[in-house]
Image (spheres, rainbow, N blue to C red):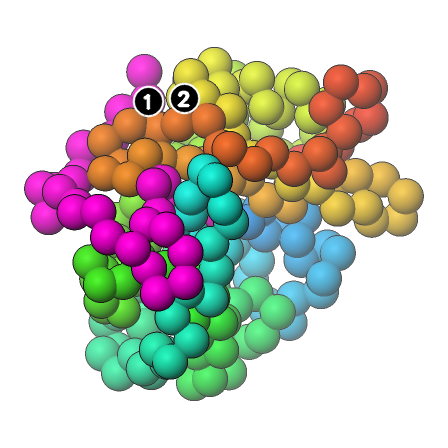
Amino acid sequence: MFQFQLTSVFCIFLFAFSPIYEAFDHWQLVLTWPAGYCKIKGCPRTVIPDNFTIHGLWPDSVSVMMYNCDPPTRFNKIRETNIKNELEKRWPESTSTAQFALKSQSFWKYQYEKHGTCCLPFYSQSAYFDFAIKLKDKTDLLTILRNQGVTPGSTYTGEKLNSSIASVTRVAPNLKCLYYQGKLELTEIGICFNRTTVAMMSCPRISTSCKFGTNAGITFRQ
């Protein structure tokens, strides 16, 4: 069974209201499959990651989608080299070179201001990014899929991809697909957790882009 044990600093939360919406009640860790994403979007990198990378960590509410929760709060550029390098490994801006991404930090800025501010005041900017790194490291989607016989380089239905993850996590993931030359490509998987992240939960909002309930083939690109 897929279990998570996070340090107590990340397991104890108080409830509070965001400046715009009600308090977040769950998280969605949104992971990109780089091979599929880069095939569609184009990535000017010499090496494309061969494992899932972070698209974002989204505090959210079951009753209302949360974003841009605190417009006055602005992203502060990350100065610490070790933190930048750890984020670059797990949360790269694939559509830019590593050198440009590390300098501009535009992807991290966008994600923090749109989503990361929704967990204020309990997570500072540094705590938010540190938490994202730790949660990513404990969410090994590629191993889950491979253990269920789902490997990069093959084509599967949305139902197969979905059930392969759910058979281990026991909850519904949020798969997203895009078309490339008339065929569906797996580009993203969201995994949802309750507020304290001691347990996974079914994602409240599920994308229909992977054509569940049909025989449409989805490329899990290698």
Q: Amino acid at mark 1?
A: Phe
Residue in view at x 35 percent, y 28 percent: 200
Q: Position of residue 34 (x, y in %)?
A: 59, 52
Disc 1: CA contacts within 10 A as few (<14), some (14-19) or many (>=20): few
- The mark that comes first in sequence, 2 or 1, is 1
Q: Amino acid at mark 2?
A: Thr
Q: Position of residue 152 (x, y in %)?
A: 62, 34
Q: Are marks 2 and 1 in contact (CB under 8 Å)?
A: yes
Q: Label 1: state its secondary structure.
A: loop
The front one of 140 and 67 is 67
Q: Which residue is mark 2?
A: 169
**Quadrant, the C terminus:** top right
The answer to whether any part of residue 105 appears in the image is yes
The front one of 175 and 17 is 17
Disc 2: CA contacts within 10 A as few (<14), some (14-19) or many (>=20): many
Residue in view at x 42 percent, y 52 percent: 58
**Quadrant, the N terminus:** top left
Q: Which mark is residue 2?
A: 1
